[in-house]
Amino acid sequence: MQGYGSDRGPWRYRLFPEHELRAQILKRCTTSISSDGGSLGASLQPHVSSTNEDRYLIMDLSLPNGVWSLSCIFDGHGGHETADYLVTELPPLLMAGLLPTVANLEGVSDVLTRAIYDVDEAIKRDFLEIFPEEVNEIAAMSDVTVKARVNDQSSGGLNYRKALRCLRGSTILLALVDPTKKHLWVLNLGDGVAVVLGSRQDASSQWNTSILSDNHNGSNPTEADRIKQQHPDEPECIFDDRVLGNLAVTRAVGDYAFKLPRIYTEKIFLNVEPGFRVPAAIESFIPRNLSPPYVSNLASVRYVDLHAKSSCDYFILMCSDGLVDLYMDDPNRSESLTSLVQKWVGIVGDVVRDDIQEAMLLLLRQALGAEDIDSVSCMLTVDMPVAYMDDTTIILQVL
């Protein structure tokens, strides 16, 4: 198997023997396991020159009624800065919101959606403190003035970091389990993310699966119609299945080029240095930005009563869209998300409770090429000039 491209390649890669593949996959992953061993996260981006923009966390939240379990995947795009911010800032917001609601579980869903809204609004508020002027005043500002104010790296870079969090974006996938492990909440903001709940009565029966996330993507007719209804006189608000013809996700934290009036992008965001990786791509959609916001920070939340079937075994599988893309980008393996979910549960269902690390390795091995040693080796080592696969992050949790 060789690298491929329009006018370059083939590219070299290293072929590993079967007995080395396990270690080679682990070598390229960052992993983290919970204190009780019941949750495992792994993130993979094998391209040596590419920075993995996914972030994830697995942590305990100590509240008056016991220890809650929190697992999150933040799939950054355009850069890692917004995802980094979420790792630091979201857990304290969740803690503060959950404290008064632990006695009333009905309020947890609202706490989760409010925390996502608040953390995104904090990004905007921090930025607007740098530029408190009215829109017409910003339009009259010189580039020299803007650059001097925002590109303050020589004096610590506080303003620069605040601006970067607006230029970048991140999706969110979150699972919260109460101390009794009878109540589960799953929140998502963004696209291409699958959350799977598997359960079965006994070893002889099949696993039952539920997809607990919504697809917040411009290719989803429901999401596209929602944005078109909000901007009825703008035929290019969704263009090529993307928001303003540029952004695939319809809901995210950050991405303020799609949430603020265009003057902020023209006068400020494009003057952040270094800023956008491909400024021309940003400039191309500015004329379509007529009545923002186009990207939402309203998350979807699902609640699952795990106590309803107390005799069942449960586990959660969370992943960034990179895991889905490893299948969808291969015409020989592309299939519906529902079919993929069934495949994933079949791979890990009988293993995850006894050996969660083995379950994770099996899932990654299958996605990278399954039993095809050549394909797996190529995905791990091919020497292409740019990243050839999306950042891929998975969390497995046994309940």
Image (tube, helix red, strand yellow):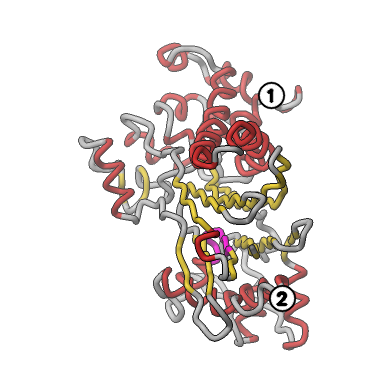
Residue bounds of the magenta highlight? 316-323
Where residue 99 sits, quadrant-wise, is: top right
Where residue 370 sits, quadrant-wise, is: bottom right
- The residue sitting at 68% across, 74% down in the picture is 361
Query: In the displayed structure, would residue 180 be above or below residue 126?
Result: below
Residue 152, which numbered label?
A: 1
Q: CA distance from mark 1 to mark 2?
A: 52 Å
The answer to whether residue 398 is left or right of residue 22 is: left
Which residue lies under the disc numbered 2? 354
N-term mark: 1 or 2: 1
How many residues crowd around disc 2 within 10 Å: few (fewer than 14), some, or many (20 or more)? few
Q: Which element carries disc 1, helix, strand or loop?
A: loop
Residue 371 locus on image (x, y percent) = 61, 87
How many residues crowd around disc 1 within 10 Å: few (fewer than 14), some, or many (20 or more)? some
Q: Nearer the viewer, residue 260 or 356?
A: 356
**320 falls in the magenta region:** yes
Q: Give the residue type that dot 1 points to.
A: Asp
Residue 75 locus on image (x, y percent) = 57, 51
Q: Is residue 10 visible?
A: no
